[in-house]
Amino acid sequence: IAGITQAPTSQILAAGRRMTLRCTQDMRHNAMYWYRQDLGLGLRLIHYSNTAGTTGKGEVPDGYSVSRANTDDFPLTLASAVPSQTSVYFCASSDEDSTDTQYFGPGTRLTVL
Amino acid sequence: GQNIDQPTEMTATEGAIVQINCTYQTSGFNGLFWYQQHAGEAPTFLSYNVLDGLEEKGRFSSFLSRSKGYSYLLLKELQMKDSASYLCAVRDSNYQLIWGAGTKLIIKP
């Protein structure tokens, strides 16, 4: 693994189903983030984690949950998917140098029908 | 509220120079980022500004004026591979990134 990986690459899901999007990084970054990207809108933060064992809510957390059991993994769960959660989901992580730059995974394209 | 404004779309010619502007109104300021995003791919980091002035990195430069809430990304010697969306993001007082909707840059031969 080099950087951040996400799975699945894409998924079509029936409304009401539960879904977990996976994110793994091998850079030993403490901070991790989940964003959604919708056409015409900027990236919007769903949840974040500053370090293993802690999580926080972003701008659009409703309908989503996260956990951070260890440094490398940061799964995002949709408990009961709705069509408005159709989006592209990006996971990111950041180092703690002077810039705290965020680095992104390849994304998961999710369609909820 | 917090707001990042960028033009939706710009067109430029291969070999030319283009300037993409970004204005922001945020609760606090802890740095401004530019990212490049090719269609169907993840955003990739281009530049970071926290102090006023110009940061140059090869064909790309980024400028910041904190007093004006303004930044621009300057791309020189445009190549076809520069066709992408360019995202401006500001880190606010809570150390969260606030993102603009992005500027789609179309390069014509």
Image (tube, coloured by chain):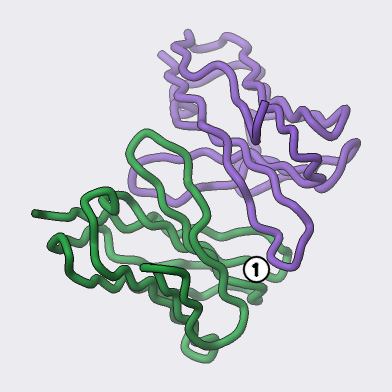
Chain colours: A purple, B green
Q: Position of residue B3 (x, y in %)?
A: 48, 67
Q: Quadrant of the C terminus of chain B?
A: bottom left
Is B48 situated left or right of A14 in this image?
Answer: right
Instruction: Report the amino acid beneath label 1.
Output: Asp
Q: Quadrant of the N terminus of chain B?
A: bottom right
Quarter of the view holding residue B70: bottom left
Q: What residue is at 45 percent from the left and 67 percent from the top? A: B4
- In this view, the residue in front, A17 or B18, is B18
Q: What residue is at 77 percent from the left and 62 percent from the top? A: A97
Q: Residues within 10 Å of mark 1 (few under 14, many from 20)?
A: some
Quarter of the view holding residue A5: top right
**Residue at numbered disc 1:** B92
Q: What residue is at 12 percent from the left and 62 percent from the top? A: B13
Q: Determine whether A111 is above or below A98 in the image.
A: above
Q: Seen from this angle, which residue lies furthest bottom?
A: B67
Kindly identify which chain the residue marked by label 1 belongs to. B
